[in-house]
Amino acid sequence: MMNCVLARHILFACFLACLATDCQGVANYYIGAGIADVTGPAAEVNMMGYANPSQKSHGIHMRLYSRAFIIADAAKTSRVVFVNVDACMISDIMKKKVANKLKTLYNGLYDETNVCVSGTHTHSGPGGYHRYVLFDVTSLGFVEESLDPLVDGIVKSIQNAHNNMVAGNIYINTGVLLNSNINRSPTAYLNNPPGEKAKYNYNVDKDMTVLKFVDGNGQPLGMISWFAVHCTSMNNTNGYISGDNKGYAAQLFEREMNPGSLPGEGKFIAAFAQSNEGDVSPNTKGAHCIDTGKPCDVSTSTCNGKPELCVASGPGKDMYESTKIIGKKQYEKAKELFDGANTLLTGPVDYRHQFVDMSNQKVQIDATHYATTCPPAMGYSFAAGTTDGPGSFDFTQGTTTGNPFWNFVRNILSKPSRAQIQCQHPKPILLNTGEMSFPYPWQPSVVPTQILRIGELMILAVPGEFSTMSGRRLRNAVTEIATQQGLPSNTKTVVAGLSNSYADYVVTYEEYQIQRYEGASTIYGPHTLLAFIQKFKGLTTAMAQGSTLSSGPSTPNFPSKLISFLTPVLHDSPPLFRSFGDVIKQPKSKYIQGDVVKVSFISANPRNNVMSGKSFLTVEKKQSDGSWKTVFTDADWETSYYWKRTSTILALSVSEISWKIPDQQPKGTYRIRHFGTAKKMITGSLKSFVGSTKSFQVV
Ligand SMILES: *[C@@H]1O[C@H](CO)[C@@H](O)[C@H](O)[C@H]1NC(C)=O
């Protein structure tokens, strides 16, 4: 039976034999799974996602990770890499840097064409990692110190996966997960054709798709689940770095499969990936007016005309409980589908990748009509934000007419041409980003499209946020052309959202007419989706026919130094007669299970060292031989690490650490330690320090 993994041409025969007897030793693929820390600066950096300039990092609730899966066919002739990153999205410079590093490390085995990097869409990670101006505005420009840990961690997770590769199998399973997502722009969805809507039970996708990876002996290696829901359970006031609902789901799954391991150190890797979540919110109580508690106006998402009062929340009593509930639901469904998965993937590993200039794609609407996509532009409703994170100006969603004042301001930045206005119609243009190139481009025109194939599964890697119906149309179009072109009739598709680059939202032509936030942020005009569908059909056809594709146009040149207004850390100081790491607040001597331990230390700016793969805190338990064993880190849900400046002039700061003692926590003697790095005045040299509390009892 072991010959099966070596000779591809007899694989199918082996597979039949395997069905007839048992599957031990038959491995269809070579598989590797790896994880690495990507947590960025835990202070003073704007969080990516809500575009709220006052939402800056000030500590860590959960660390952010990159989880990589390498899949090669049994003969190792072809391989693909799927990487799921706790990041709001993947920027094109992030992907480029990752691909360049991989090229050097592996001599071409991995490059941008066979590696898909996808973001979970957490809105609680440090931002500024884009080249295009618009995406860096609220982070005060480009933030290298946010980008570097992401690039290094993504590469490291792929290296770990590469070093772990073993012969194995992949099972697929799909199921329905209810009460975990709602449509946040239902009036736009409603505008889709009745016949199309009638084919679906819900106005969001409730399906979760799970891949189960096992080694040749059937031992579990890892899991990927795709489920469409925004990672916006934590709202736009949160300053703790967090993986949000998907990050928590991953922590629960990995804890169960890696008993006794600290986060990021277990062998089993569980990735909760994003899909067509464009119009999908996790805040299942829906949008209400925060002043009156009544539902908001449904078509504009306002209360008395004000968008900032209309906020969605739930299902929990606060954002932490909501994150926990939505995360747990995804974990439980994924675990159930993982345990029940028994459909084996068989067949080739393949991929196609092509850049496309989305600003001028000709699309065929019907037998006789053609149209084109447009250079990027953002509509008025973009500035209204969403009910997950409303904007703070007087913009409202569902706006199809402009306003003279804002048009005046817009024209100072860039006055849209008549052709651009017509092309983007009915979107009133607020930011004519496609025609803005000072100091460099504001939004991308050239973006990557990519399909990874693993046997019967096609992973459609899209560089943005597809609405529910857009994702369905894309999947259906690919499935149809795939089977027409001779790919297996049981071909399955998943949309991998926020992959490889970022070009905002993609809604259907009908949803675009309503100009909710997602329509206003569909940047290439009303035919954006159709253009993407054409491209993905092209990728599918090329794959089915075994033909190669040109790499497509190249992205524009950027200056080697991108603009940044974020000030660096100047220096850190302890107060007079005190040292870094000194305890300001000691624990009590005794706690019971369920209590929260709160301590604080004299500290320094966490930006001095992001502590990749390490921790700013440890909860340690005393062992019978007198040594201390770390039982929780800053990555765990139960702990939180909060940093605050206490004097800017004197460069003083404090770190507050809390630990919620779990109900099942073993009794015994514990202590909490804090790790940090301080920056010296004048020389700027960095020095690490550690502090420890007195020991305390959990009784
Ligand atoms: C964010 O959530 C907290 C509860 O955790 C709530 O007090 C606050 O009002 C929310 N803010 C917004 C803008 O949603």
Image: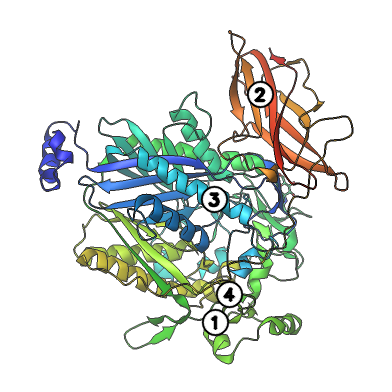
User: Residue 440: x percent and y percent?
Assistant: 60, 74
Label 4 residue SS: loop
* Residue beneath the point at 55% across and 83% down: 425
Q: For the residues carrying marks 1 and 3, which lies nearer the camera in this image?
A: 3
Residue found farthest to the top: 624
Task: Residue under label 3, please give it.
Answer: 150
- Residue 517 in view, yes or no: yes
Three-letter amino acid code at the position of disc 2 = Ile
Q: Decide which of 522, 614 is in the foreground and name it.
A: 614
Q: Identify the disc placed on residue 441.
A: 4
Residue 485's quadrant in the figure?
bottom left
Task: Residue under label 1, please give it.
Answer: 424
- Residue 397 in view, yes or no: no
Q: Are marks 2 and 1 in contact (CB under 8 Å)?
A: no
User: Residue 596: x percent and y percent?
Assistant: 72, 26
Task: Residue under label 2, please give it.
Answer: 661
Position of residue 364 relative to residue 295, above or below, is below
Which class describes the residues within 10 Å of circle 3: few (<14), some (14-19), or many (20+)? many
User: Residue 51: x percent and y percent?
Assistant: 67, 61
Rounded to the nearest angstrom, the CA distance separating label 4 from label 3 is 23 Å
